[in-house]
């Protein structure tokens, strides 16, 4: 796909309307760059101040099956037709935008800087450094403490009995205990030293997996008045908050240069209505380019 800003589409249409001669014809309009779907989404995430995503490739047969099932729901966003459109691509064979605008069209990043997208659900989180460190220390202590208690007192802590009720008895129980302790220590250590989006995703899966396994095999834990399993919900919430904060941090700490550059780009649009003129009524000009042209 080759997205073009709506302001430039309006400018191109206005230019055709103001032409003195005939404007009859088919004009294919596109932006500066042709992007795949992942590239477009990555630019949207950057404009929203979000960090890098964890991309999960989905095989096309599974996508087609999902599209067929999605058609049973009253929506038109995800269907076999939209999937075929993504597979075919949607780029102009001959981009008329440069001719109609009198300049190359803006790229997607420039357009999003002019009119930033608004998320339907804003999940950006910004934590002060001391708060972020305190949450990471608490989370790391939880993982490492759990591993230490389980390894040093496997019988007294009841972990072997729990594993046996989950189907890991005897040598299988000790193997599962060792694997769990190694995982917990690794998660705790990495939380302190090398936090990352992937790490928090793994922690979320581990918390949910531990909780569901214990709840299904030892249901009385869910009814305990001390709530040993229910307490995993705030732990999961803490992990998700750290996950979102870490994902937003790279975009929030890029420096004053990029901030000023984005501020300059957000002032790119100037609308000049000229009656009786053959020029376009809407002019999108880059401030830097205009400055360079005037100085030269």
Image (tube, rainbow, N blue to C red):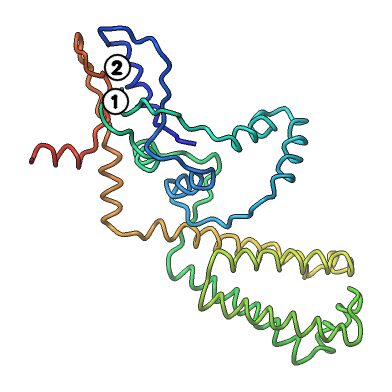
Q: Secondary structure at mark 2?
A: helix
The image shows residue 75 at horizontal and vertical percentages of: 68, 29
Rate crowding at label 2 as few (under 14), some (14 to 19) or many (20 or more) other CA atoms within 10 Å: many
Residue contact at pointers 1 and 2, CB within 8 angstroms: yes
Q: Quadrant of residue 183?
A: bottom right
Tell me the residue that label 1 is attached to: 101
Rate crowding at label 1 as few (under 14), some (14 to 19) or many (20 or more) other CA atoms within 10 Å: many
Q: Is residue 81 above or below residue 228?
A: above
Name the residue at 61% across, 38% down: 87
Q: Quadrant of residue 22?
A: top left
Q: Secondary structure at mark 1?
A: helix
Tell me the residue that label 2 is attached to: 15
Name the residue furthest left. Answer: 295
The answer to which of 149 and 67 lies nearer the viewer is 67
Q: Is residue 171 above or below residue 223?
A: below
Q: Quadrant of residue 162?
A: bottom right
295 with respect to 243 (left or right): left
Name the residue at 33% across, 33% down: 105
176 with respect to 237 (left or right): right
The answer to which of 122 and 256 lies nearer the viewer is 256
Q: How many marks?
A: 2
The image shows residue 207 at horizontal and vertical percentages of: 71, 67
Mark 1 / mark 2, whichever is N-terminal: 2
The image shows residue 2 at horizontal and vertical percentages of: 45, 35
Name the residue at 45% across, 46% down: 43
């Amino acid at each position: 796909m080759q997205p073009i800003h709506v302001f430039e589409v309006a400018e191109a249409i206005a230019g055709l309307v103001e032409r003195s001669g005939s404007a009859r014809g088919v004009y294919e309009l596109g932006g500066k760059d042709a992007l795949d779907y992942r590239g477009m989404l990555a630019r949207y995430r950057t404009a929203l101040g979000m960090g890098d995503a964890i991309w999960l490739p989905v095989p096309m047969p599974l996508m087609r099956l999902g599209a067929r099932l999605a058609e049973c729901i009253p929506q038109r966003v995800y269907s076999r037709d939209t999937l075929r459109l993504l597979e075919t691509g949607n780029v102009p064979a001959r981009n008329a935008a440069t001719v109609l605008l009198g300049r190359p069209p803006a790229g997607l990043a420039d357009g999003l800087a002019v009119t930033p997208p608004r998320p339907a659900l804003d999940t950006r989180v910004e934590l002060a450094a001391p708060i972020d460190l305190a949450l990471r220390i608490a989370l790391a202590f939880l993982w490492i403490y759990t591993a230490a208690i389980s390894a040093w007192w496997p019988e007294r802590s009841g972990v072997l009995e729990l594993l046996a009720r989950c189907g890991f008895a005897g040598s299988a129980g000790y193997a599962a205990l060792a694997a769990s302790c190694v995982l917990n220590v690794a998660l705790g250590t990495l939380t302190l030293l090398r936090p990352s989006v992937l790490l928090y995703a793994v922690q979320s899966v581990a918390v949910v997996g531990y909780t569901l396994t214990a709840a299904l095999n030892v249901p009385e834990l869910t009814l305990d008045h001390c709530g040993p399993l229910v307490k995993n919900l705030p732990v999961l919430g803490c992990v998700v908050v750290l996950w979102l904060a870490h994902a937003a941090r790279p975009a929030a700490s890029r420096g004053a240069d990029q901030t000023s550059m984005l501020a300059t780009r957000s002032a790119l649009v100037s609308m000049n209505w000229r009656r009786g003129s053959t020029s376009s009524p809407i002019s999108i000009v880059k401030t830097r380019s205009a400055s360079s042209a005037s100085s030269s």
